[in-house]
Every structure is written in structure tokens, then in C-alpha cells.
Amino acid sequence: MLPENSSTYQSVWGDYDLNGSMDVFTPNYNYSQANTLHRNNGNANHWAAIRLRGVESNSFGLNAKVRVKAKLNGVNARWQIREIGADVGGFGENSIIAHFGLQDAEIIDSLQVRWPGGLVQTYTQIPADQQLTVTESSGPPPELDWTAPNLGNVVVGIGQTWETDCQIKNTGTGTLTYDLVSNQSWLLVDDHSSDDVAPGDSVLLTIQIDAEDLDQGNYYGQLTLNTNDLNEATTQIPVTIS
Ligand SMILES: [Ca+2]
Ligand SMILES: [Ca+2]
Ligand SMILES: [Ca+2]
């Protein structure tokens, strides 16, 4: 993996490209030699990455313990644990994002974060294959309640616009924060694209497809809804027009 005559004291781990597989970076102490990054092309196994944002504790969540319980190979529900640290050595540090390999598990049964100050946060039924941010909070949890609009095959005449409404509701007991992002200039979300929703409240969004400047043909886009409801943290909605 390392080039010949490479001079190093250590390597560090992290999933820099978020493909679910850990990559290795080796800093070189000899200035005339390059550092090396080994990109791991990975495999089909499921995974999860947990990033911490401390509020009362230190902001990286150093010394926090992250535990994940999942049924590996469909049978044994087992716990795995990572302690967030920055204590590897003098030439580099491992990623401070807790990374878990989950084999065939598509769902995390239980995620538990124990902060250095003693606070414990627990979440259940979280989809695998994503990076989640857990913010230190003793407050009650939000609960996203919405139905993703079906935008799978919208027929919009060239030169025309089309729109639909979509309601985002918070049926939980803590504030819901969301962010709805489009990856195409012809796919628009009105000015509530990012907001806070108080418990019991809801927000009505307008999603618009603007084909005014498009040529005849098929177009593909995607909306992504990010929220602080951990088991519905990311929802992707494919949008196709013809
Ligand atoms: Ca990777
Ligand atoms: Ca939820
Ligand atoms: Ca829900």
C-alpha cells in the first residue's frame, strides 16, 4: 500500500468520501516524500457513521461513547462501541466520526450516546448507510410526520410550470429542524425550504417545477429532506419530468 522507502510513524483512519468504508491516510515525516491516501473501494456491507456535536461537553464530543445495536447476519443483536478520541499520536489523528460496520443489517435497533458530562441519549430504528449528527441535548425529541409527494413521473409541458404542496408536521415534543434541498435549477422549493417547526405545528411548502427554459426531453432531479428526527434524518425524493 505504501510507496517504497516511505518514512512514517503512523497511519490514521477515516471515511473521507463517505462511501461507508474506512480509508487510510499516512502522513510522511520526510518532506521530500508525498503523504499517501489509500481509498477503500469497499463492499456491499451496511454501515453507519455518527458525528457528535457537543453543547455542554466539548464540541467534538471527545471522550463520549457511542454504542450501536444491530442484528448482524439476521440473528444476534449485538452492541458495538466506539469512544471518540484524539489521542492516536503526534503525526495525525483518526476521524472523530464514530464508524460502524453492520454487515447485512439495514436498520440500527438502538443508538446510544453517552456524553462526557454523563447525559445519555438513545434513539431507535435508524436506517443504516448514512452519516448522522447527534447534538447533545437533554430536551424532548421532535417527530417528523409527512408524506413525501409523489414526483416520480410529472408531466410538464415545455415552457410551463407545475406545482404541488407538501406539509411538514412536528408531532413530537421537541423542536423539529428541517432543510429541503433541490439538486436542479428547474426544481424549486419556496422560502420555507429550511425552518424550525415547534411541537404540534406544521409548515406548508410549495414545490415547483419550472420547465420554462427546458428543451424537449426527460429530466431527472432529486429533493433531499434533512431533519433532526434521527430515524428520519434524510429522505430522498426522486423527481422525473417528461
Ligand atoms: Ca471511504
Ligand atoms: Ca421519527
Ligand atoms: Ca415519523
Image: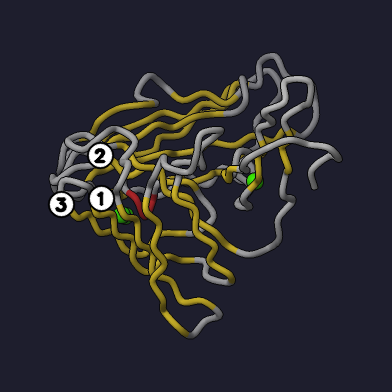
Image vertical order of residue 29 relative to residue 9, above or below: above
Mark 1 or mark 3: whose residue is earlier in sequence: 3
SS class, disc 2: strand
Image vertical order of residue 92 relative to residue 11, above or below: above
Residue drawn at (66%, 16%), measured in percent from left and top? 212
Q: CA distance from mark 2 to mark 3?
A: 24 Å
Residue 37 or 143: which is nearer the viewer? Answer: 37
Residue named by callout 1: 143
Mark 3 CB lies closer than 8 A to ligand 2: no
Task: Using residue 20 as the reference point, say whether residue 201 is left or right of it.
Answer: left
SS class, disc 1: loop
Residue 228: numbered disc = none
Residue 47 or 190: which is nearer the viewer? Answer: 47
Mark 2 or mark 3: whose residue is earlier in sequence: 3
Q: CA distance from mark 1 to mark 3?
A: 25 Å
Residue named by callout 3: 118
Q: Are marks 1 and 2 in contact (CB under 8 Å)?
A: yes
Report the amino acid beneath label 1: Glu
Image vertical order of residue 91 relative to residue 144, above or below: above
Residue 14 place in picture, x, y as percent: 57, 44
Q: Are marks 1 and 3 in contact (CB under 8 Å)?
A: no
Task: Using residue 225 as the reference point, say whether residue 143 is left or right of it.
Answer: left
Residue 168 place in picture, x, y as percent: 32, 40
Report the amino acid beneath label 2: Leu
Residue drawn at (23%, 48%), measured in percent from left and top? 115
Residue named by callout 2: 176
Residue drawn at (19%, 55%), measured in percent from left and top? 120
Residue 174 or 8: which is nearer the viewer? Answer: 8
Mark 1 CB lies closer than 8 A to ligand 2: yes
Q: CA distance from mark 1 to mark 2?
A: 7 Å
Mark 1 or mark 2: whose residue is earlier in sequence: 1
Residue 169 place in picture, x, y as percent: 26, 43
